[in-house]
Amino acid sequence: MSLKINDADFTRLVNYMEQKFGINLKQKRVLIEGRLSNTIQQRGFTDFTGFLNMIFADKTGTEMINLINKLTTNHTYFYREPEHYDFMVQTALPYLEQSKKDHKVYIWSAACSSGEEPYTNIMQTIEYFSRKAAAWTIEELATDISDRVMDLARKGIYHQDTMKNLPAGWDKKYFKSVGNECFQIQPTVTSKVKIQKFNLMDPIPFKARPFDIIFCRNVMIYFEKETKEALVKRFYDVLAPGGFLFIGHAETIDRTNSKYQYVKPAVYRKPLDVK
């Protein structure tokens, strides 16, 4: 049975999510009721009020993160939005190969979820450099707000259904079977990824060196305009001149209020001539 959320509970949930995490749920009342009703009843509550009281009383933050996952998590899989990987092979990585005298490529997956995106990024980069890969240092920072999905990413075990879009041969090259139609990604990939907790609403502390490529896909669809603009500006500040920002194909950046160069749908670039 689907439960209904009253106006007071809806308002306090919406306001908290926007202020704390930048997530806009103002038009998501039906989604909230649909995604949470079963959970509420399974946890022994009869209405949203008691359930939300429990969420807000949890000092560990675990219950709130679980709630965010319920409300915002999309289905993810390897090689999602393949147009981005075509662009990496045809444009982004050739540029980095020519321009990076130190032979180091630094990528950030800014909402890594259970790891399919950052591991795809690494596999694509290794494939591009091919026999020259040993001469290159390829590293990726993968961040998320959820400990649960980051734990899944660290384990690196995936059902074969998430691997259907992988190019031919990648499954055998980068994964090993662990039974029950599941596969574990190999250390040749996982060793290049550092997984770390981070809330995209916070100031970015990763400033030791600029990123060459940032992926932040299918997250900003939940953000208010001002929140999104502030986030892409923070990305700009930690992106190397000439570096690329990939966003989801359902997302856009307001070019009139942005310093990025528009490259193509869902791909933006920091100008090369920035001091």
Image (cartoon, helix red, strand yellow):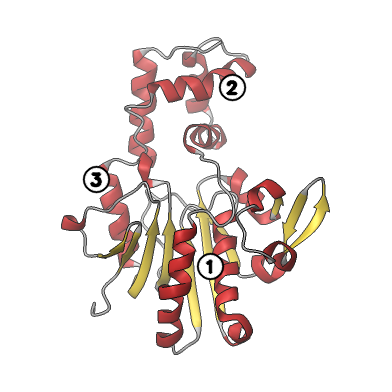
Check disc 2 and report its element: helix, strand or loop. helix
List the single residue furthest toward the front. Answer: 168
Tell me the residue that label 3 is attached to: 226
> Which numbered marker is on residue 196?
none
Check disc 3 and report its element: helix, strand or loop. helix
Q: Amino acid at mark 2?
A: Thr
Tell me the residue that label 1 is attached to: 140
* Residue at position x 39%, y 41% in the image: 21
Tell me the residue that label 2 is attached to: 39
The answer to whether residue 42 is above or below residue 198 is above
Alpha-carbon neighbours of circle 3 within 10 Å: few (<14), some, or many (≥20)?
A: few
Which residue occupies the foreground of this view, 31 or 92? Answer: 92
In the rendering, at what x and y percent does residue 30 appear? 41, 21
List the single residue furthest toward the right. Answer: 179
| Distance of label 1 from label 3 (alpha carbons) | 28 Å
> Which label's residue is closer to the chain start, 2 or 1?
2
In the rendering, at what x and y percent does residue 24 appear? 34, 35
- Answer whether residue 209 is visible to the viewer in this image: no
